[in-house]
Image (cartoon, rainbow, N blue to C red):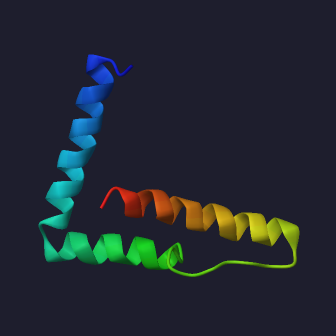
Amino acid sequence: MRTKESNMLAQQALDDLDAIMRTENGRRFIYAILESTEVETAVFSSEPYFNAFLSGKRAVGAVSYTHL
């Protein structure tokens, strides 16, 4: 169960994202982040450490994308 404080923090994060997305500069910034994390690209490398890096990078983008 969420506490009052965690609810307030979640709402603040949504409000912050809303403020960012209201400006063209903010949307461009968020798009650049999503593009750099290759969220819309399948990632694979036969080298396990590089594959883990790519998967982690994509996971950050995927989580960010869900908040939009």
Q: Residue at x 20, y 61 (%)?
A: 20
> Quarter holding the C terminus?
bottom left
* 32 versus 63 height, above or below: below
For this view, does 55 lie left or right of residue 24? right
Q: Position of residue 41 (x, y in %)?
A: 57, 81
Q: Position of residue 65 (x, y in %)?
A: 39, 64
Q: Position of residue 46 (x, y in %)?
A: 86, 78
Q: Position of residue 24 (x, y in %)?
A: 16, 77
The count of marks equals 0
Q: Residue at x 29, y 21 (%)?
A: 5
Question: Which residue is outermost to the front?
Answer: 1
> Quarter holding the N terminus?
top left
* 53 versus 38 height, above or below: above
Q: Residue at x 17, y 47 (%)?
A: 15
* 39 versus 8 height, above or below: below
For this view, does 31 lie left or right of residue 25? right
Q: Residue at x 45, y 79 (%)?
A: 35
Give the image quarter of residue 3: top left
For this view, does 65 lie left or right of residue 28? right
For this view, does 19 lie left or right of residue 48? left
